[in-house]
Image (cartoon, rainbow, N blue to C red):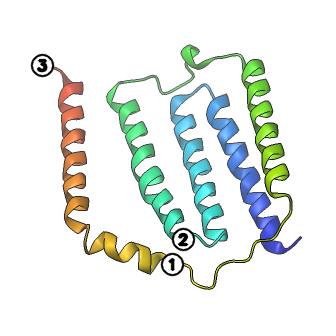
Amino acid sequence: MTGLDLLLAGVGLLAVGAGWAVVATNQVVRAGLWLVVCLGALAVEFLLLGAELVAWTQVLIYLGAVVVLLLFAVMLTRAPIGPSQDLDRRIGPASVVGVGVGLSLGTLFAVAYGWTRYELPAQHGNAETVGGPIFTTWALPFEVVSVLLLGALIGAVVVSRGAK
């Protein structure tokens, strides 16, 4: 086992622990912050595996947009910031299902792939070859989507204020 394998395992355990904290907490804001830790750990996993474009996409889309949208929704809907009785749930059945799914997926991957090492192809893409067309050919659609999202955010603020 190499140092990279140990680092991957450590960051993976951090992601799993943060994911567990997301579903185990009874406070919406803390769940959102644990989600930041979990998604950030997944981005680090992608970086360690050499998929930098996927890692930065994870950071931009999930950490930069989805979590911010979640926290804006909490603020705009006036959801309770502290512990909420609506979020209290029985952990036992969820634990059984989660452990069962995790063991099933682990067994599936172990049977399908084992510990076989796969060699990388001689030519593989990097962030420059994949990201170049995004910011040249697809720059206008990218900006149109950003304006659309801005309009949706303004609409959410207007709807949340209500008619007077």
Circle 2 — which element?
helix
Identify residue for label 3: 163
Image side of residue 103 versus residue 154, left or right: right
Front in this rendered view, residue 64 or 112: 112
Q: Which residue ends up furthest to the bottom in the rendered image?
A: 122
Point out the image quarter for the C terminus. top left
Residues tagged 1 and 2 counted as in contact (Cβ below 8 A): yes
Labels 1 and 2: the sequence-earlier one: 2
Front in this rendered view, residue 80 or 48: 48
Alpha carbon separation for disc pair 1 and 2? 8 Å
Q: Residue at x 79, y 45 (%)?
A: 108
Neighbour class for label 2 at 10 Å: few (<14), some, many (≥20)? some
Give the number of the disc on residue 142: none
Q: Nearer the viewer, mark 1 or mark 3?
A: 1
How far from the left and from the top, in percent, is residue 62?
A: 46, 50
Alpha carbon separation for disc pair 2 and 3? 46 Å
Front in this rendered view, residue 110 or 94: 110
Identify residue for label 1: 126
